[in-house]
Image (cartoon, coloured by chain):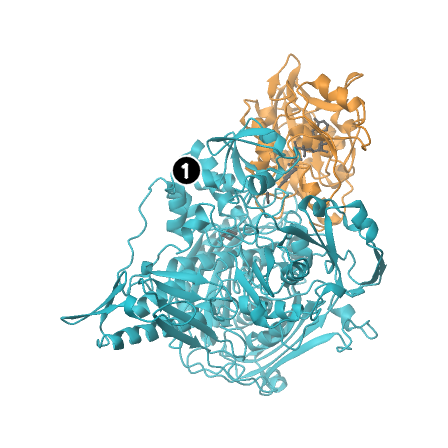
């Protein structure tokens, strides 16, 4: 018996002594507020206080809890009212997805109990052990410095003022008090556990032996599922015509981490059976690693229908590139290589499924419930309406949860066994098996005339799309459109290929290949400016694409092209930081650091970007519904999954202002395929624009119905008081008795507004000409940093980020997106490199910690987008794209070093510095 | 499978003396911060000897001949202990072991027993001339840390032994320690290279003795004895850094891995050792 004090109460529990405290809390005691992201001390999501000290519960044996006093997130607000610390987090938007938040709060609680007024450095030290992938940490630091003030929440915005208000997230409190339910928090107690056994080989064939001995050895093993147990199609994939990835491999694997069989049983059994106990006889083959190997003559073929291993090619072409480049006053050319990048959301994939009659009901992580429902159905061989998928809270997605992961496995198991089946990926499994950012080899040659105007760009990118198609086609199509960067250029040729290899499937990751291409275009812009003797910012400003200019696809921008404004806003910061850097470098001299002197060089870089919002030249509608019940409840039926970016809050703000009622009068049902319509994917930065517009249309539709029923004019003011709805129109007040009205449809609402929006685009022709996106986001960021010349290490000092978001529906959440995007950009630029089999955990695979993200100044440029709701467009991906180019440019500015292989790990920076010092300036 | 929580050293070494029935030997568990990360995913049950309750193994104490760090002393306890500047390097290293959660739980002895080439505790303790006290049912013995650490995750500890303490001799002269770590991010980072050192000084501001160690550049961290000799007797106010040469790095044999190439590691080791010497002299 293990006895201890938990959140002030004595508890005693019978459990195996070596069980992790996380499991003891979550499974034995049912307190799921403490999160698990790695079980290895790396993420800190499991941080609790033991005897007044912050500790990772995942590394504490249950036995050691005995006699101690433990506080978890559930203990922060014992009286039900959230604490000053939690309130500060809410006020500052310090929780996005919320999966790291319990750990952050406990680490902060530990700090504040010892030191009620910590300095920023003390805060960073205290929180250094908790990773957050969403917030970029800055709002967390802000919140902690503001706890003592204990200010009340901002007053609720007046009716009609919700859009533009910095309100706390509408789902914010449950992310702070431990009650939010993520993928691993929802399964019923009697659920069986599923664990996939995965390939240790990148390319191999295999045969399965007799399973009876395994069953005999482990009575708790209920069933081992193999490829032949898939009732429908043993294949899934993003594109309707490409279902190339097997749910369970059928005799052949194409990457390390591919699922081979699924073990289902009680938890202890599933956690005990080692992979090598499962009778799989492997015949390993030489894998194709990298695009060069996969495109070499005679390379083995991954998919029979693609004999050259090329999944798809993309192309945008306009004008005579050779002629224009030959005539250019200056040209620059370069090549860069980027790495696999892991999403590293702190929440591993999790969920459960159960069979209800002839239906499967699932609660799991997802970024696109309806598409995933349809995928699960075709794997089960049933009609889509026989699957219900309810999105749990998603602990970070960033594109990684746009693909199926555990869904078909638990669906199949629950289908056959008719028992609830749950699964949660271990961190190494999550990293090995799920999609990554495409490694890219990008090269280009650009030219400008003597006045500093771009005349032509030539670009090619090869993208390693791994073993399965996933989002490879999206990347191959999106990149050529964006290859010119946010600049006006009349002549362009941009081509791309997505190439299959025996590496993890590369899929969707914040930016769909555009961040990789931006590294190249911003390098070339710097080089051209330097050759022309122009300031790097001014050169960009001269070329910034503006309203009236045509893109490389021939689309003439008619509105909301705010890059020039962003650059103008940045200009004073640019000048100031450049001057400071020059002065600092002058003082410290131009030493080479060869004799151990701490030679620090400071540099300032700039990166610009543009990003088409929504899918490329494809219909991507969102459908929304808002209803009023007989009791006067206003419900938004919202199929858009909030993966932390804040769509639930923003859509509610839009609904409130379109309907013209207070924002807190609306409740929501989110992401349930039985209850909400298809809002499309939470990707491509599209939910604010597309779903936002659909919500606006639905709310206006509802408003119009109310006004019509009450014979009120267009300015009528709606007030809902329980079952009585009143409309004030001038001096007249009209009333609707909601209880007297007939309920409509399955929601039981008496009044419903509908909205559907599909952003207007046209298909691209064979030269990539057309209107691929209805609108684009623009941004420019400046990075100020220092390089330790002798070690090749980089210390970031500051970012200044100017973003044209059309309209900031909630500036606080927009800032949070920018912070988080910059943090991921820092990772991409400086440290993140996924190598299968070698960096499959969060200590070998490094993402930025709280100490790695410097202060960020944000300038919001609001160049209204008439297509979007209240003038808004999107921010999710634009936040990340310019960051790596700005960092790499600043490293060049500081040292002359050109890092060709990203990330710019210290050893690569040092190498590049030596090369630059050797006088072989590339 | 067994799980024992002895409360005394005798009880613990008594258990270690006899292998558990049917098992493959006791697995010693202290703070668990190396133990659990090595056990993510399915695995067979083990016999665990949880020493966290063993009495008398916690805390830092001054002794007649120097200091004793009990085997269960955590990194946080080292940071918070009242210790002379000799220990500044060890304290700096302690602050860099993982995050605060790790420091609150992880033990100094566990770091040594785990014997990772990148263990941040080893170079400072080498520079402090640490002796490792091992206890078994047969008695106790003491080993120099350099003898205790035998290579990458290999130590001289016999399976029937428990590390009970780390002993640090009091130097003859006023002394100061320091530590420098190179990693690819700010917190929670495995060292690419780290160096620790102690310089003892004479009353007339000369180096009485220098002890410099480098980690993550060989299977086990190494003292740079040629450099130590070169520094001995030098006036502190001269440019000591200039004395450090590539030749002094001869004991190092770094490898290429995801964190850096061998060549880069050597390059950085030179820089870091020079900076360390600079700081120690000032
Ligand atoms: C996220 C994270 C970050 C980390 N960062 C760093 C870092 O920056 N630098 C660094 O050096 N380390 C780091 N570590 C490693 C670890 O925290 C340290 O090595 C710690 O000091 C180990 O102590 P412990 O008590 O937790 O060891 P345990 O995990 O309990 O044991 C470690 C090993 O030592 C053995 N052992 C422990 N005590 C004894 C004893 N008294 N007698 C005999 N055998 C014993 C155990 O059997 C085991 O093999 C990190 C770990 C994590 C999880
Ligand atoms: S789950 Fe404990 S640190 Fe990640
Ligand atoms: S809010 Fe920190 S990981 Fe999502």
Residue in front for this viewpoint, B36 or B190:
B36
Chain shaded orange: B
Counting from the top left corner in percent of width and height, residue B186 is at 57, 45
Residue in front for this viewpoint, A198 or A250:
A250
Q: Name the residue under label 1.
A: A78
Residue in front for this viewpoint, B138 or A794:
B138
Chain shaded cyan: A
At x 53%, y 45%, the residue is: A32
At x 54%, y 70%, the residue is: A525
Counting from the top left corner in percent of width and height, residue A706 is at 28, 73
Counting from the top left corner in percent of width and height, residue A424 is at 63, 52
Disc 1 crowd, CA 10 A, few/some/many (<14, 14-19, 20+): few
Q: Is residue A72 above or below residue A246?
A: above
Q: In the figure, is residue A454 to the left or right of A427?
A: left
Subunit that carries the residue with mark 1: A
Q: In which quarter of the image is the N terminus of chain B?
A: top right
Q: Is residue A562 above or below residue B260?
A: below
Q: In this view, does A807 lie above or below A219?
A: below
Res B175 quadrant in image: top right
Regarding mark 1 in the picture, which secondary structure is present there? Answer: loop
């Amino acid at each position: 018996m293990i006895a201890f004090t938990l959140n002030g109460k004595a508890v005693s529990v019978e459990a195996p002594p070596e069980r992790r405290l996380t499991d003891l809390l979550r499974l034995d005691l049912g307190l799921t507020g403490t999160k698990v992201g790695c079980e290895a001390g790396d993420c800190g999501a499991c941080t609790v206080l033991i005897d007044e000290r912050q500790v990772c519960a995942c590394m504490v044996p249950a036995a050691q809890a005995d006699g101690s006093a433990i506080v978890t997130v559930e203990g922060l607000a014992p009286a039900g009212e959230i604490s000053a610390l939690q309130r500060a987090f809410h006020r500052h938007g310090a929780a996005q997805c919320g999966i790291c938040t319990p750990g952050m709060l406990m680490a902060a609680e530990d700090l504040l109990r010892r030191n009620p007024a910590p300095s920023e450095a003390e805060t960073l030290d205290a929180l250094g052990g908790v990773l957050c992938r969403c917030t970029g940490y800055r709002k967390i630091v802000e919140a902690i410095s503001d706890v003592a003030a204990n200010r009340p929440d901002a007053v609720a915005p007046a009716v009609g003022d919700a859009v533009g208000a910095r309100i706390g997230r509408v789902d914010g409190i449950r992310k702070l008090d431990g009650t939010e339910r993520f993928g691993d928090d929802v399964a019923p107690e009697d659920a069986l556990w599923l664990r996939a056994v995965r390939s240790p080989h990148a390319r191999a064939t295999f045969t399965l032996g007799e399973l009876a001995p395994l069953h005999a050895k482990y009575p708790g093993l209920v069933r081992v599922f193999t490829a032949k147990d898939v009732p429908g199609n043993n294949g899934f994939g993003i594109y309707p015509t490409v279902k190339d990835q097997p749910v369970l491999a059928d005799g052949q694997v194409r990457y390390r981490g591919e699922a081979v069989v699924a073990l289902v049983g009680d938890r202890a059994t599933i956690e005990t059976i080692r992979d090598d106990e499962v009778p799989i006889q492997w015949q390993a083959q030489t894998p194709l690693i990298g695009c060069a190997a996969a495109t070499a003559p005679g390379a083995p073929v991954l998919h029979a229908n693609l004999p050259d291993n090329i999944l798809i090619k993309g192309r945008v072409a306009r004008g005579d590139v050779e002629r224009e480049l030959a005539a250019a006053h200056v040209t620059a050319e370069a090549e860069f290589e980027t790495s696999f990048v892991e999403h590293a959301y702190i929440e591993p994939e999790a969920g459960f499924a159960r069979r209800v009659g002839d239906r499967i009901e699932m609660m799991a992580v997802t970024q696109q419930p309806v598409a995933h429902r349809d995928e699960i159905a075709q794997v089960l061989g049933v009609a889509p309406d026989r699957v219900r998928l309810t999105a749990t809270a998603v602990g970070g997605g960033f594109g990684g949860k746009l693909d199926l992961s555990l869904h078909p496995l638990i669906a199949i198991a629950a289908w056959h066994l008719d028992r609830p089946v749950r699964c949660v990926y271990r961190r190494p499994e999550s990293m090995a098996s799920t999609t990554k950012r495409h490694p890219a080899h990008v090269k280009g040659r650009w030219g400008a005339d003597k006045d500093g105007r771009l005349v032509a760009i030539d670009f090619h990118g090869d993208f390693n799309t791994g073993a399965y198609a996933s989002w490879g086609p999206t990347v191959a199509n999106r990149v050529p459109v964006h290859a010119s960067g946010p600049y006006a250029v009349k002549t362009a040729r941009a081509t791309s290929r997505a190439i299959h290899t025996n590496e993890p499937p590369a899929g969707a990751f914040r930016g769909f290949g555009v961040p990789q291409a931006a590294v190249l275009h911003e390098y070339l812009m710097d080089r051209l400016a330097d050759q022309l003797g122009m300031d790097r910012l001014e050169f960009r400003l001269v070329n910034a694409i503006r309203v009236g200019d045509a893109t490389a696809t021939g689309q003439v921008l008619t509105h909301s092209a705010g890059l020039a404004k962003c650059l103008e806003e940045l200009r004073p910061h640019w000048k100031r930081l450049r001057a400071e850097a020059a002065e600092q470098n002058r003082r410290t001299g131009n030493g080479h650091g060869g004799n151990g002197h701490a030679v620090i060089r400071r540099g300032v870089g700039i990166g610009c970007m543009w990003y088409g919002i929504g899918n490329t030249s494809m219909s991507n509608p969102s459908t929304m519904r808002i209803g009023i019940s007989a009791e006067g409840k206003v419900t938004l039926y919202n199929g858009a999954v909030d993966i932390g970016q804040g769509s639930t809050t923003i859509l509610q703000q839009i609904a409130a202002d379109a309907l013209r009622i207070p924002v807190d009068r609306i409740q929501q049902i989110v992401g349930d395929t039985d209850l909400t319509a298809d809002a499309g994917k939470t990707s491509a930065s599209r939910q604010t624009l597309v779903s936002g517009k659909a919500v606006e249309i639905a709310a206006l539709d509802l408003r119009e119905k109310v006004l019509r029923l009450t014979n009120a004019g267009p300015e009528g003011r709606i007030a809902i008081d329980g079952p009585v709805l009143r409309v004030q129109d001038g001096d007249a007040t009209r009333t609707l008795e909601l209880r007297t009205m007939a309920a409509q449809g399955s929601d039981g609402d008496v009044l419903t507004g509908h909205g559907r929006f599909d952003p207007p685009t046209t298909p691209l022709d064979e030269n990539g000409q057309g209107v691929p996106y209805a609108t684009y986001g623009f941004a420019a960021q400046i990075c100020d940093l220092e390089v330790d010349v002798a070690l090749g290490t980089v210390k970031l000092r500051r970012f200044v980020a100017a973003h044209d978001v059309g309209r900031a529906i909630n500036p606080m959440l927009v800032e949070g997106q920018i912070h988080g995007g910059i943090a991921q950009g820092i990772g991409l630029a400086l440290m993140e490199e996924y190598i299968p089999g070698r960096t499959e955990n969060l200590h070998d695979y490094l993402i930025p910690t709280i100490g790695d993200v410097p202060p960020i100044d944000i300038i919001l440029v609001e160049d209204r987008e008439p297509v979007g709701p209240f003038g808004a467009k999107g921010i999710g991906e634009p936040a990340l794209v310019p960051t790596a180019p700005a960092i790499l440019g600043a490293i060049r500015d500081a040292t002359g070093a050109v890092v060709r292989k990203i990330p710019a790990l210290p050893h690569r920076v040092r190498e590049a510095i030596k090369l630059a010092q050797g006088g072989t300036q590339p | 499978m067994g799980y024992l929580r002895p409360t005394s050293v005798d009880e613990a070494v008594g258990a270690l003396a006899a292998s558990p029935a049917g098992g493959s030997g006791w697995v010693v568990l202290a703070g668990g911060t190396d133990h659990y990360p090595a056990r993510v995913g399915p695995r067979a049950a083990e016999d665990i000897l949880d020493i966290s309750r063993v009495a008398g193994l916690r805390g830092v104490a001054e002794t007649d001949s120097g200091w004793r760090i009990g085997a269960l002393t955590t990194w946080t306890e080292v940071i918070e202990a009242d210790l002379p500047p000799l220990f500044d390097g060890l304290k700096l290293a302690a602050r860099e072991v993982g995050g605060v959660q790790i420091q609150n739980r992880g033990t100094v002895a566990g770091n040594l027993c785990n014997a990772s080439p990148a263990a941040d505790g080893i170079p400072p303790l080498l520079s402090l001339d640490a002796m490792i006290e091992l206890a078994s049912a047969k008695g106790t013995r003491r080993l120099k840390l350099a003898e205790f650490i035998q290579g990458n995750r290999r130590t001289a500890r016999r399976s029937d032994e428990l590390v009970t303490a780390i002993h640090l001799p009091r130097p003859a002269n006023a002394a100061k320690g320091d530590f420098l770590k190179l990693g690819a991010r700010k917190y929670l980072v495995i060292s690419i290279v780290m160096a620790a050192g102690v310089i003892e000084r004479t009353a007339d501001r000369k180096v009485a003795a220098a002890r410099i160690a480098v980690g993550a550049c060989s299977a086990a961290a190494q003292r740079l004895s040629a450099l130590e000799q070169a520094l001995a007797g030098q006036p502190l106010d001269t440019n000591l850094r200039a004395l450090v040469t590539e030749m002094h790095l001869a004991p190092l044999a770094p490898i290429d891995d995801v964190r850096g190439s061998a060549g880069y590691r050597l390059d950085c080791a030179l820089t870091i050792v020079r900076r360390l010497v600079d700081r120690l002299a000032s």
